[in-house]
Image (cartoon, coloured by chain):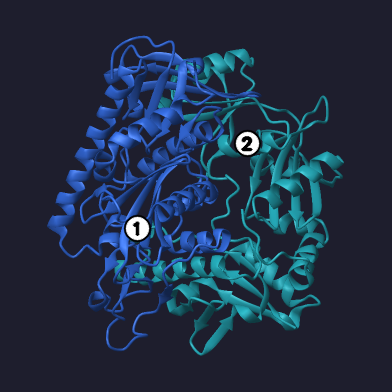
Chain colours: A blue, B cyan
Amino acid sequence: MQRMSLTNGVILIVGERRDRAPIGLAGLLSGHTQENTSNAARASFDIANEERDWVHRFGRFCLDRGRQVVWLCRMSDAQLAVRYERDGPTLTFRGCGELEGSCFGQDAIQGVWYRGLPALSTFASEDEQTFAERETEAFWEGYGYHVRLPVLNRPRTAGLRPATWENFLVRYLVADQLGLTIPQQGVIEPRRESSGRVAGRIYQTLSTRTLLEPDCAAGAETCAWIESRRSGRIAVCAVHVGDDVVLSRQTESAAEPLSPGLLSEELARSLEAATAAVGRLLGESFGAVFWDVDPRDACFDFRDYTTNPDGRILMALRSHLFSSIWRFFMRSGGAS
Amino acid sequence: VKDILFLGLKGIRTFRYTVEKAANGPYRDRIRVVDLETFIQRGSVDIGPDAEPVLRIGSDAIDFERITACYALLMDLPRRLVREGLIRESDWHPCRARLSALILALHRTTCPVINRPLFDAGNGSKPLQTFELARLGFPVARSLTTNSPEEAMAFAEELGWHVIYKSASALPSVANRLTPDRRRDLERIRSCPIFLQEEVTGPDVRVHVVGAETFAERIDFQGGVDARYSPRESRQFHPVAPPDEVRERCVRFAAEHGLWIAGFDFKQRQASGEYVALEANPTPGYDVYDFRAGGRISESLLRLMAEGPLDRRERP
């Protein structure tokens, strides 16, 4: 963000959140589907803008506290080298282009925030583009997985990152390993239910993960289904940074602080503990759990998890999250 | 007595070989085979909330309740196939959906799956996996990933140009020597990073792990840096017994990553005999090694599937 040689306390932000369209969790939570493409496109645009605004504001937050944020949006904006040694990998960063003059070594880095693949040059063919993207991902997976610094979130291959598997699998993992309850779910074949699909369920195609209303699930392909949120329950979004948890009420477009008294203190504490346990189970230092909560009976079901809460949620909760993220990066292990 | 299930493409040599071994072995009356191509065209999966998954193809049903272990060698069905006209768009969606449903079933079942889909042991990123192997105590080669030609050259100079380059990901590439006459080619890495490693001279060693058993072969060869691409006539194969600590680490690495079978690639340093770990393959093409080993690997695999011991709840 600023043109200077950096010697200490750099927070390196890598790439951008890629899944901007609200296909997955936010839509699932609010019951929205992809029927209205213009709404979806507008929402996608809003999320992208909020994302950038969120990162810029976080950069200013850090700068006010004496730390420099360097945001690598494009791979071509830096000459990078990672040496793998006994004590872990060491990165050398030499900025160019937009980041000309930002030069630092491993010792200067306080922490790394991997938000997704940085933009790459355009290649002549789609195959070359795919190759370059995968190679670049592997570059960051190697560094981000092994570097001995706070990393939010550690990039790694899909096999080592169950949080990125199908929502269906993540739910079973959480239920099996933590004993938490989940909504009913399953897989259904086309035309197995003669009069359309069952009401009270949300369907998702398995090839493109598109959400479908029951009447639109016309039997074109195998779908996963999940029970809709039951009446009397509310959607609670719990964003965690390490074990710090911020609870919010999930709304159609974002999140809002919980109104006082909506959840009992005991229930709120249980939700926070369960959220932190899910984060630990999945090995993620940052993410959001979406809960179906029954405030009256003080119980809750695990519905979904994302490692990439969308920018609108983050902006709504920034007053809490900035300080949580700051604490995460300032914990031992980073540069002094 | 429950069945043992084989799930994969009949066109894939390792799968075909494994099924043939099973069909001619002591458990031949217990085998069920599902051809992946047929399944993704016509199959279906039932996964309910509280029951083992059931696979169906036509009138044939396979209930995982009745399966003792499953050998699965799945392949991806990328969109590229549509782009290249190898599959119609209208067919891709239902086929891809069935493949995803199958992956869900293979994770949902409590039946041991060799190996469960998605369990990659970090194999998708060489720098990640190499240093995951180092974490378990394996010696590994000095390595660098970079998009800087200057850094790449400095690394090569430090190592007297005894350096090889290869892809950082699992995408196919041939490892090769970086030589001083290729300095100008390094300009190309500005747009795509490269993975460089110290060249370790010596024979290749392949170690297969099946459960807690290991099978190893040394491959002496000349020319090139990878025996697979060296002149065929220069290759010589020898059964070998790696040191205990190497075998123990292989078994531990596989177990930690939820793999019942895995193939480990090593270079054995010419001078010291040290085993330098290169890679751990979660879906090893073990058939050619098994052929030379007189079928000992496949016997072990089939025995493990048919008789155990297998933990029904393995997780990464």
Q: Is residue B311 left or right of residue A284?
A: right
Q: Is residue A228 left or right of residue A272?
A: left
Question: Same chain, marks 2 and 1?
Answer: yes
**Mark 2 or mark 1, which is nearer to you?**
2
Residue A284: x %, y % from top left:
48, 44
Looking at the picture, tell me which residue is in the foreground, B80 or B301. Answer: B301
Question: Mark 1 — residue?
Answer: B84
Residue A49: percent from left, percent from top: 19, 38
A106 above or below A252? Answer: above
Q: Which residue is mark 2?
A: B130
What residue lies at 43% left-to-right and 73% top-to-bottom? Answer: A186
Q: Earlier in the sequence, mark 2 or mark 1?
A: 1
Please state the horizontal and vertical placement of residue A87, each as a whole percent of the image: 63, 23
Give the total of numbered labels. 2
Work out whether B60 lies above or below A238. Answer: below
* Mark 1 surroundings: few (<14), some (14-19) or many (≥20) residues within 10 A: few
Instruction: Give the amino acid at mark 1.
Output: Glu
User: Between residues A142 and B194, which one lies in front from this camera angle?
Assistant: A142
Query: Which amino acid, by three-letter code, is at mark 2?
Result: Thr
The label number, if any, that marks residue B291 in the structure image:
none
Return the x and y of residue A325 as percentages of the image width and height.
39, 32
Residue located at (22% from left, 44% from top): A47
